[in-house]
Every structure is written in C-alpha cells, then in structure tokens.
Image (cartoon, rainbow, N blue to C red):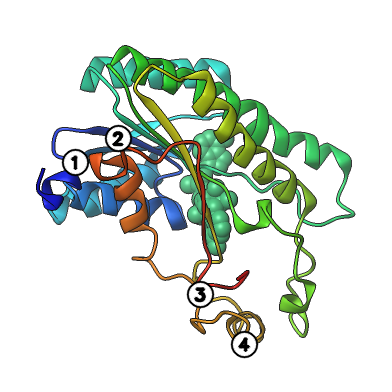
C-alpha cells in the first residue's frame, strides 16, 4: 500500500474527549485534516459547538456532542448518540482531564473528585467506547497521559513563578493510564483493537516567562510542544500506518527526559 494511503483516515469515525481543550483541539484538527469524521465531546456544549463551527469554516468534518465522563448515564448517552448519528466508531482518543486538585496540600476530597473523572470515569468511558469499536469491527484507542505519569515533578521549573507545585493526583492517574493501556491491549487481543498511549510534555500556552525560561533550557529542542507536534503521532496511531504498534506508550517531550 502507498504510504500516503496508509495514513489516510477518510471514512473513519473518531471521538476526541475534551476535544475543545488545549491538546484536544490539536488532536481533532490532525484527525480531521487526515480525512476522518471527528466528534469532539465535552461537558460544556457551547464550548464544543463553537470549536466545531470554527473547524467547519475550514471544511473540516468536526461535530460536537456532550459528555460528562464522571457520570455513567452521560457516557451511555454519548455512546447512543454516536450510534444514532454516525452508526459506528473507529478511533477513540481518550484525552479529557479535569483538574480539581490544586496542590499537594489541597483537601483530600479534591483528590477523590479527580478520581471520579480521571480514574473511575475514564475507565467507564474507555470500556463503553471500546465496546462500540469492537461492535464496529475493530479500531484504534489512543490514551493521552503525560510525561508526568512517567517521572517525578521537576520543581526547578516553577522557581521564581507563582505557579506552585504540581498536584499529586495528576501524577497518579496518568501513571495508571499508561499501564492500563498495556492491560487493555492484552484484554482485547485477537479483536482487531489496538490500544496505545501518548505521554506528551508541556504544550506552549503563554505560560509565565520565568517558567518558559526554566523549562525550555532543559529541553534539547529548546522549546515547549507546539500545536502541530502531536498531530502526526495521533494520525500514525489512528491509521493503518500504525497497525503493528500496540500496547505502547510514546513519550513526546522534545528530549526533555532523554
Ligand atoms: N497541556 C499540557 O501541557 C499537557 C501536557 C502533557 C499532557 N497533557 C494531557 O493532555 C490531555 C488534555 O489536557 P489539556 O491540557 O489539553 O487540558 P484542557 O484542560 O485544556 O482540556 C481538557 C478537556 O477535558 C474536558 N473535561 C474535563 N472534565 C471532563 C468531564 N468530566 N467530562 C468530559 N470532559 C471533561 C474539559 O472540558 C476540557 O475540554 C490530558 O490527558 C493531559 O494529561 C497535557
């Protein structure tokens, strides 16, 4: 098969949770530019509708649906809406994240709130969407974790800023998601379902100047990730081009942890 055809996603129905967020928007754009029909789903319908409309103006096939992944009925309703409106699901990018815990000393209830969405809710939506993909004949699941699920925090990045220390729940649930990826790849063996994970480094988002200075000098590429960096990797894992990659976690950090 020609290599351009291997990367082509024409006709593939793809779901990106948190698709109106920072990385989610880049992921949705990459999938749609490769030809996929993309559903972006989030809690705030106005937000996803606006982003889908922006993409429509660029002739990209992006649709908005609602989900609160911390609420089982909402996950089931998303599944039913995908079946009714699109008939199938081929690609699921599990990208949504909530950040209710602000730092190490925050109330323990904030940790529990985080787990509701980022652990229990994530397991719920993964199981339901993989079920839909299985019923559609197979496909690709891409979990978005973080380099913070692989390494401890580098506190020197925050020196001279008022950003505080990073919250512990994020390190906990992202590490879990990386190994859940391997678990799911095994559980769905023989069902034409691949499960992979991307662990990105920080995305440039106009962070404070001092943070950018602290962070970028340690990255061999001397910069944070930009809006294009994740697109190729997503399309690789979603498409036939990545068909022999399974159960993998790919660190995308510009060499920061090399
Ligand atoms: N931004 C970064 O620098 C960075 C770095 C490494 C990894 N990541 C990973 O990228 C992914 C996206 O992060 P981001 O920074 O783009 O986040 P973001 O906050 O910009 O977007 C997250 C999205 O998830 C949605 N969401 C939150 N709770 C939800 C719920 N209960 N149900 C449905 N949707 C919900 C939000 O509405 C939002 O659209 C995460 O998995 C994160 O771990 C981000």
In whole angstroms, how far apart are the C-alphas of marks 3 and 4?
A: 10 Å
* Tag 1 and tag 2, C-beta contact below 8 Å: yes
Distance between the Cα atoms at labels 1 and 2?
Answer: 9 Å
Mark 4: C-beta under 8 Å from nearest atom of ligand 1: no
Q: Do residues under tags 1 and 4 come within 8 Å of each other at their CB atoms?
A: no
Per the image, label 3 sits on a secondary structure element best described as loop
Could you say which is closer to the camera, residue 148 or residue 207? Answer: 148
Marks 3 and 4 close (CB-CB < 8 Å) = no
Comes first in the chain, label 1 or label 2: 1
Residue hosting label 4 = 213
For label 3, the residue is 224
Circle 2 is placed at which residue position? Answer: 14
Residue 29 appearing in the image = yes
Residue 204: image x %, image y %? 49, 72
- Between label 1 and label 2, give the one nearer the viewer: 1
- Residue 139: name its quadrant: top left
Q: Toward the viewer: 86 or 43?
A: 86
């Amino acid at each position: 098969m020609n290599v351009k055809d291997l990367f082509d996603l024409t006709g593939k129905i793809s779901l990106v949770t948190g698709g109106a967020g920072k990385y989610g928007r880049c992921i949705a754009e990459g999938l749609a530019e490769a030809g996929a029909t993309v559903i972006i789903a989030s809690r705030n319908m106005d937000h996803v509708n606006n982003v889908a409309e922006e993409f429509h103006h660029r002739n990209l096939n992006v649709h908005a649906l609602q989900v609160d992944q911390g609420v089982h009925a909402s996950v089931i309703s998303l599944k039913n809406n995908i079946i009714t409106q699109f008939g199938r699901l081929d690609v699921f990018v599990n990208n949504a994240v909530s950040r209710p815990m602000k730092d190490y000393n925050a109330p323990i209830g904030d940790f529990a709130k985080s787990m509701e969405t980022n652990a229990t809710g994530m397991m719920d939506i993964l199981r339901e969407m993989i079920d839909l993909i299985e019923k559609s004949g197979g496909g690709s699941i891409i979990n978005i974790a973080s380099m913070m699920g692989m390494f401890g925090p580098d506190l020197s990045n925050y020196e001279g800023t008022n950003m505080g220390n990073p919250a512990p729940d994020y390190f906990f649930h992202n590490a879990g998601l990386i190994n859940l990826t391997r678990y799911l790849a095994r559980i769905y063996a023989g069902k034409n379902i691949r499960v992979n994970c991307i662990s990105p480094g920080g995305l440039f988002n106009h962070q404070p100047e001092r943070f950018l200075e602290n962070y970028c000098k340690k990255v061999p590429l001397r910069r944070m990730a930009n809006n294009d960096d994740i697109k190729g990797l997503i399309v690789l894992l979603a498409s036939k081009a990545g068909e022999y990659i399974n159960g993998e976690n790919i660190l995308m950090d510009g060499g920061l942890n090399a």
